[in-house]
Amino acid sequence: MSKSKGNVVNPDEYVAALGADTVRAYLMFVGPWEQGRRWDDSGISGLSRFLNRVWALALEPYRPSSHLSLDGEIRERVRIP
């Protein structure tokens, strides 16, 4: 790919649609940077969904279960009388 041949993919469109973190992560997971690759956007939407799930999980408030007692569970697992 080269600018003179006009076959360069502009990442600005992908950054606007999916976010810069998604594009950066996709470029890191494509393969070794030094080897270069043809741009194939078939996997970028899956990576975007994955990052959105991770972000939603990180923002979800922690809600401990009231029916589970950690002390009782530990005692049961290690058989403390």
Image (cartoon, rainbow, N blue to C red):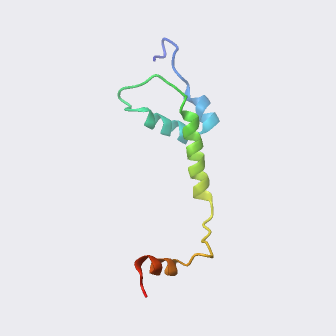
Q: Is residue 20 visible?
A: no
Point out residue 69 in the picture as x, y percentages from the top left corner: 55, 78
From the viewer's perspective, tell me whether residue 5 is left or right of residue 12.
left
User: Outermost residue, bottom direction?
Assistant: 81
The quadrant in which the N terminus is found is: top left
The residue depicted at 49 percent of the width and 40 percent of the height is: 25
From the viewer's perspective, tell me whether residue 29 is left or right of residue 55.
left
Point out residue 51 in the picture as x, y percentages from the top left corner: 56, 46
The residue depicted at 61 percent of the width and 37 percent of the height is: 18
Along the line of sight, which residue is nearer the eye, 30 or 72? 72
From the viewer's perspective, tell me whether residue 28 is left or right of residue 56.
left
The residue depicted at 54 percent of the width and 39 percent of the height is: 47
The quadrant in which the C terminus is found is: bottom left
The residue depicted at 50 percent of the width and 81 percent of the height is: 71
Point out residue 39 in the picture as x, y percentages from the top left corner: 49, 24
Along the line of sight, which residue is nearer the eye, 80 or 13? 80
Point out residue 26 in the picture as x, y percentages from the top left corner: 49, 36
Relative to 37, does residue 57 appear above or below in the rendering?
below
Along the line of sight, which residue is nearer the eye, 72 or 10? 72
